[in-house]
Structures are given as structure tokens and as C-alpha cells.
Image (tube, rainbow, N blue to C red):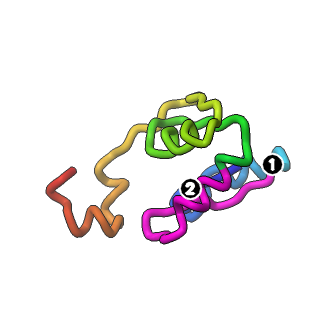
């Protein structure tokens, strides 16, 4: 399972992965200069990708020929999620 770095930092999904003995790795973040290459290698290694929201990862996975599915309670973005985000702090007016 690939876990977004912010989810990893907050402890999301870790318990479920450990409970069901699912191996997991941290995905790419905005500040990671190798993020596109890392995600390309990950998505190219798997046939399926499942997510609970629509984001750029859906397009990247589809580009790498993953079969994409959206499942579970849909994740909704909220403005308060971005208060510590470097991009949001620099450009708060675009949200």
C-alpha cells in the first residue's frame, strides 16, 4: 500500500495495514524532487490502484496503465487541511 506522506505523518492507514499485515510505503510529496519518477515506478509495478478521492494520482496511475477504482468514503478537502502547507501559505488567495 502506498500512503501519502501527510497521511503517514498523521498515522492514517498505518493501523489497518499492520492489522491486516499489508506492506506499505510512503508516497511522494509536493516537495520531493523525485516524486514523479517514484510514482511512475510504483504505478508501473501494479495492475490496480484504488483511492478514496480524485487527484493527480488518478491520472498518473491511468497513464501507467493501472486500472483505477474509487472506493470507500469519499475524501473531501477542507481549507483547514492546508494551513501548514507551504504552497497555501505562499498563495492563500487561490483557495
Q: Quadrant of residue 87?
A: bottom left
Q: For residue 7, which numbered disc appears in the image?
A: none
Q: What's the distance in space between the residues labelled 1 and 2, CA to CA?
A: 15 Å
* Residue beneath disc 1: 22
**Total number of numbered discs in the rendering:** 2
In the rendered structure, does residue 32 fall within the stretch colored magenta?
yes
Q: Which residues are magenta?
A: 23-42
Q: Is residue 90 above or below residue 65?
A: below
- Mark 1 and mark 2 lie on one chain; the one further toward the N terminus is 2
> Which circle marks residue 4 in the picture?
2
Which element carries disc 2, helix, strand or loop? loop
Q: Is residue 27 magenta?
A: yes
Image position of 51 with respect to 70: above or below: below
Q: Are marks 1 and 2 in contact (CB under 8 Å)?
A: no
Where residue 40 sits in the image (x, y, percent)?
60, 53
Q: Nearer the viewer, residue 11 or 44?
A: 44
- Location of residue 72 in the rendering, given as x and y in whole percent from the top left corner: 58, 29
Is residue 69 or residue 75 the one in the foreground? 69
Q: Is residue 75 above or below residue 81?
A: above
User: In x, y percent, where is residue 80?
Assistant: 32, 54
Name the secondary structure under disc 1. loop
**Residue ID at (73%, 55%):** 24
For the view shown, which residue lies furthest in the left direction? Answer: 93
Q: Residue at x 33, y 69 (%)?
A: 86
Q: Say whether residue 29 is left or right of residue 87.
A: right
Residue in view at x 60 percent, y 42 percent = 64
Amino acid at each position: 500500500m502506498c500512503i501519502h506522506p501527510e497521511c503517514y505523518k498523521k498515522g492514517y492507514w498505518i493501523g489497518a495495514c499492520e492489522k491486516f499485515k499489508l506492506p506499505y510505503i510512503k508516497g511522494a510529496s509536493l516537495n520531493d524532487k523525485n516524486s514523479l519518477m517514484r510514482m511512475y515506478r510504483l504505478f508501473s509495478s501494479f495492475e490496480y490502484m484504488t483511492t478514496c478521492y480524485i487527484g493527480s494520482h488518478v491520472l498518473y496511475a491511468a497513464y501507467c496503465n493501472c486500472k483505477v477504482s474509487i472506493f470507500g468514503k469519499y475524501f473531501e478537502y477542507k481549507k483547514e487541511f492546508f494551513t501548514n502547507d507551504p504552497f497555501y501559505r505562499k498563495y492563500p488567495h487561490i483557495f
